[in-house]
Image: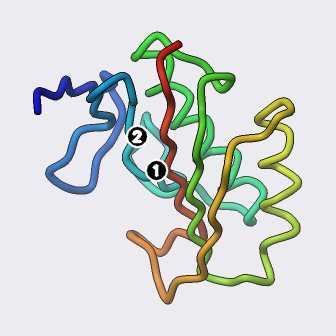
Amino acid sequence: MPRKAYNVNGAATVGPYSHAVEANGFIHLSGQTPLDTTTGKLIEGDISAQTAQCFGNLFAVLAETGLTADDVVTCSVYLTDMKDFPAMNAVYERQFSKPFPARTTIGVASLPLGAKVEIGLIAARR
């Protein structure tokens, strides 16, 4: 199956992967941690700040593909502490309009660079 890769200039990666890959009309965005794209380092701050940074990074990749938050169909959220769910959820809710994308939220033991949250998206071309 052919796939087209997207990478955002200046955005950091912590491994050998593309920021997004398109196949069969779907754009699969790699999970983003709350990295500051100018420094490549994890931002400081609570779960709300980290969640907002994840979405900023994701939406920059999404823009590179020509899509917006309205094209997102699925979201995967990984939290190192499920007690952070309400604060993450409050930031998440502001990122999308109804009807909201499908979502899975999973508690994990750890994330790259000590992040509190990582978020991945799948979007679809109309």
Label 1: which residue?
Answer: 32
Q: Residue at x 85, y 45 (%)?
A: 93
Q: How far apart are marks 1 and 2 (CA)?
A: 8 Å
Do tag 1 and tag 2 residues touch (Cβ < 8 Å)? yes
Which amino acid, by three-letter code, is at mark 1? Gln
Q: In the current view of this chain or complex, which residue is farthest to the bottom?
A: 109
Query: Where does residue 13 sit, x and y in percent of width and height?
Result: 29, 47
Label 2: which residue?
Answer: 29
Where disc 2 sits, the SS reads: strand
Disc 2 packing (10 Å; few <14; some 14–19; many ≥20) = many
79 vs 4: above or below:
below
Q: Which residue is drawn at 78% across and 34% down?
A: 96
Most foreground residue, 5 or 99: 99
Residue 25, picture quadrant: top left
Report the disc number at residue 5.
none
Residue 64, picture quadrant: top left
Disc 1 packing (10 Å; few <14; some 14–19; many ≥20) = many
Most foreground residue, 93 or 38: 93
Check the picture and name the quadrant holding the N terminus: top left
Which amino acid, by three-letter code, is at mark 2? Leu
Badge nearest the viewer, 1 or 2: 2
Query: Where does residue 21 sit, x and y in percent of width and height?
Result: 27, 33
Query: Where does residue 2 sit, x and y in percent of width and height?
Result: 11, 27
